[in-house]
Image (cartoon, rainbow, N blue to C red):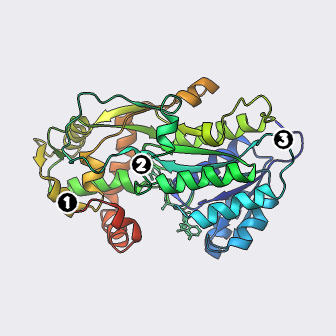
Amino acid sequence: MPQQTLHVLLTGATGFVGGTILSTLCKAHPEAHVKALVRREEDAKHLRSIHHNLEPVLGSLSDLELLRRTAASVDFVIHATKEDLAAVRALIDGLASTFSNGPPTPRLISISGIRSLIDRSLPVTGIASEDGRPWSDIQDISTILSLPKERIHAEADQSTMAHASASGVGAMIVGAPQLWGRGKGHVKTEGAAATAYYAAVRKRGRAFVIGDGSVAWSWSSIGDLGAAVVFLLERALLDDGASHRVGVNEDGYYFVRSDEVKMIDRAKAVSKRLGLGEVESVAVEVTAELHPFGPLMWGCGVTTRPDRLTALGWIPKELDWEMLMEESIRFVVMHNEYAHQSLSKLRGSKTFSCGFSKSQ
Ligand SMILES: NC(=O)c1ccc[n+]([C@@H]2O[C@H](COP(=O)([O-])OP(=O)(O)OC[C@H]3O[C@@H](n4cnc5c(N)ncnc54)[C@H](OP(=O)(O)O)[C@@H]3O)[C@@H](O)[C@H]2O)c1
């Protein structure tokens, strides 16, 4: 770890993922100076009142010059907002402006997701495929980084890696799985994907699966995701580039994963928790009505192995998915309108067009 103060820029600090990373980072490194891109003055004040080592930077992802300048003033950038190709390029350009000759050292972590691994040309069945094996971030890295660009996350992941390589900056992409539990941040603490299922079950009055629900998703607790990002940052700071202890760019894709859960097992647990009786099997179209990403989230599955992080010595700590489920269910039960509000926002957004279409 460097002796001088560590300077980090974080985007997404008010979000579910970014807020958790902020809290984890500030707890593990109270001596670090964290610049956080924040859009609203009141959020800036709120976060500043909690984290005394935080310097809010008021602005948005469209303020490219601000991003470039701020990235040029730090040792490391953690990007945890929605995808924005131009913003990430600006962050990399800022980091590259303080680049010293030699192999690229790891300086950027960008949060992505494993939905890129879903082949949406296949029918959504909810049934596990017989030849399904977990993806490895070592063995399958070249496939992961050359997926068709129309897949969710794929274009952003590839653009980040290509621009980082061309600029001599070491980038790492974290492929987050389903995230369970309540966030550790201080603004948004709920994960949209997890709460969406619990809210949909409550709305229908029955827990449901597509097909037999044998498809499975890898998952991590949100706390373990935050810990994995800080762990990677710490490992990266020890890396001088020459020994390549921490893979970057074409070797820089990292899965985080605690375990996997079948959709039918989750449905049964939710049903038991809410006292709703038999789990029902519903048509794909029904789930599309419940949520734009319903077919993708509940009828497809992706399993992964965090081989790179494991090789670096990382181990997940929160392994009880039913306990993590309870945290989010309790929130949904208390704030029933939450999921409906976020759903109507999502329906109007560009991301909606990336979801299931009825012609699939
Ligand atoms: N949540 C999951 O289950 C999950 C799973 C896998 C991967 N991921 C990935 O993790 C990343 C973060 O997701 P999340 O769940 O944390 O989302 P979130 O809770 O909605 O947070 C998004 C964050 O990005 C900020 N943001 C959005 N647009 C911005 C803009 N134009 N300028 C500046 N800041 C902006 C938001 O700021 P405001 O507060 O100002 O809106 C907020 O801090 C995404 O890339 C997502 O794909 C999430």
Q: Is residue 287 left or right of residue 337?
A: left
Indicate whether 216 appears above or below 123. above
CB within 8 Å, label 1 to label 2: no
Indicate whether 347 appears above or below 240. below
Marks 1 and 2 sit apart, C-alpha to C-alpha, by 29 Å
Task: Determine whether the residue tagged by mark 2 lies in a helix, strand or loop.
Answer: helix
Q: Is residue 331 left or right of residue 36?
A: left
* Mark with earlier residue (1, 3): 3
Indicate whether 295 appears above or below 245. below
Residue type beneath disc 3 = Gly
Q: Position of residue 143 (x, y in %)?
A: 47, 39
Q: Is residue 319 left or right of residue 307?
A: left
Marks 2 and 3 sit apart, C-alpha to C-alpha, by 32 Å
Camera-nearest label, 1 or 3? 3
What residue sits right under mark 1 in the picture? 203
What residue sits right under mark 3 in the picture? 102
Task: Determine whether the residue tagged by mark 3 lies in a helix, strand or loop.
Answer: loop
123 or 91, which lies in front?
123
Residue type beneath disc 1 = Lys
Q: Is residue 126 left or right of residue 91?
A: left
Residue type beneath disc 2 = Ser
Q: Position of residue 213 (x, y in %)?
A: 19, 39
Looking at the image, can residue 185 be seen?
no
Residue drawn 21% across and 57% down? 360
Looking at the image, can residue 144 be seen?
yes
Q: Quadrant of residue 215?
A: top left
Camera-nearest label, 1 or 2? 2
